[in-house]
Amino acid sequence: MRRLVVSAACAVLLIAGTGTAAAETDPRQAALDSAVRAGNVGMIAIAADPAGRWRGRAGAGDVVTGAKPDIAGRFRVGSVSKTFTATLVLKLAAKGRLALDDPISKYLPGLLPYPEPITVRQLLQHTSGLPRDLAPEYTWMTLPEVDTERFVHFGEVEAIHDSTVQPLLFPPGTSWSYSNTGYNVLALLVEKLTGRRFEQVLADWITGPLHLTDTFLPRDFPFVPDPAVRGYEQLYPAPHGLTDVTAYNLSRYIGAGNIISSATDLNRFFHALLGGELLPAGLLAQMKTTVPWPGTNGRLGYGLGLMRLSLAGICGPGAPDVWGHGGDVPGYNTWSMSDETGARRITVASSPDLTASPEAASGRVLVMVTEFCTPDVPGAQANAARLQAAVQPAQGPRGW
């Protein structure tokens, strides 16, 4: 398959209006409604804190029937999968099965074609220099191909090989660049050291103990089981309507973006992770040790499979840092973020992703931000727009 390069436009956050009607509406619901007016088809959000839980939705869950989105629905979480993968790798470190600063070639000899040593930590933190994704000739080149090539299978090693025909982006450890390929390598590392399939380890070490009944790795299975949040993209020019891309084979992203989950499950996962249920304190501290994400003026950092986002530039001095991950795959955008301990958290899922307008794309960020603070300071829109412009191209397939 081949690739499509779509330039990333700067996004502008939509700020919910004021007035009597807005005052009577939960600010998170107002943000959802505003984001749908900006062009998102359907959205759901679930927030939780020690005082209780809030649930909201807006737009259409099914463009044919007009039914509302199912707040309990499952969806493709995209790169939020990376935090699950990283947690499994760190659990292996806790068990003494690997050292984070060992070269990956110690465990997977011959997998990568580069002579430079690349460590497990560098793969986790995107400082390895590995290419971001598949080489151009193996992935989408036009938007219609996102539709017509949706059931293409990639074997675990094949996806890595079809990426690493490209040279390293930089010598390992000298810079930072987001890499889906690196997380596919980490999935193979989990399989090699456990002797079991990745999805089995995921179930035994995370989803089973936490009772995450909606969360699983489908591998080649192309369907999102009901109840499902449907995913749409505008893959053909008007007057052609939206294309339903809910059914999709995302085996190319085994460790990078192939997990299906729900908002409730993602909130539970980050509550457990940041609350210290899944990792020893020392490894959790390493997971939260971040390096700067380029192009965000220090507002966004990346740890070991974990994002840190400073909201000070959006909500003013004193606004918290939040932790979690975002995700982008055809049809689905996800933000799942928490405070430092996981006590206060929100997951937002929306559609479309690849073909969302700048206003729609940044509007969904507002829903997440509004859980933690009010974006009402000078420069809030511009800073949030820069965040979206930096994150979306890195996470999304081939720069979308």
Image (cartoon, rainbow, N blue to C red):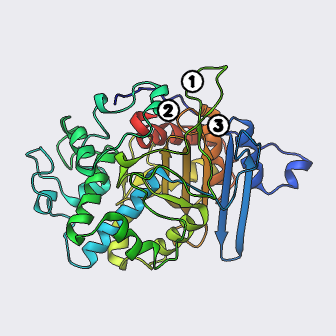
- Horizontal and vertical percent position of residue 246: 56, 45
Q: Residues within 10 Å of mark 1 (few under 14, many from 20)?
A: some
Identify the image quadrant of residue 336.
bottom right
Determine which residue is flagged by label 3. Answer: 360
Q: Kindly indicate whether the residue at mark 1 contacts the one at mark 2 (C-beta within 8 angstroms).
A: yes
Determine which residue is flagged by label 2. Answer: 147
Q: Amino acid at mark 3?
A: Ala
Q: Secondary structure under badge 1? A: loop
Q: Is residue 314 left or right of residue 287?
A: right
- Horizontal and vertical percent position of residue 162: 24, 38
> Does 363 appear above or below 338?
above
Q: Is residue 210 left or right of residue 193?
A: right
Identify the image quadrant of residue 263.
bottom right
Q: Residues within 10 Å of mark 3 (few under 14, many from 20)?
A: many
Determine which residue is flagged by label 1. Answer: 236
Point 41% across, 53% down: residue:
301
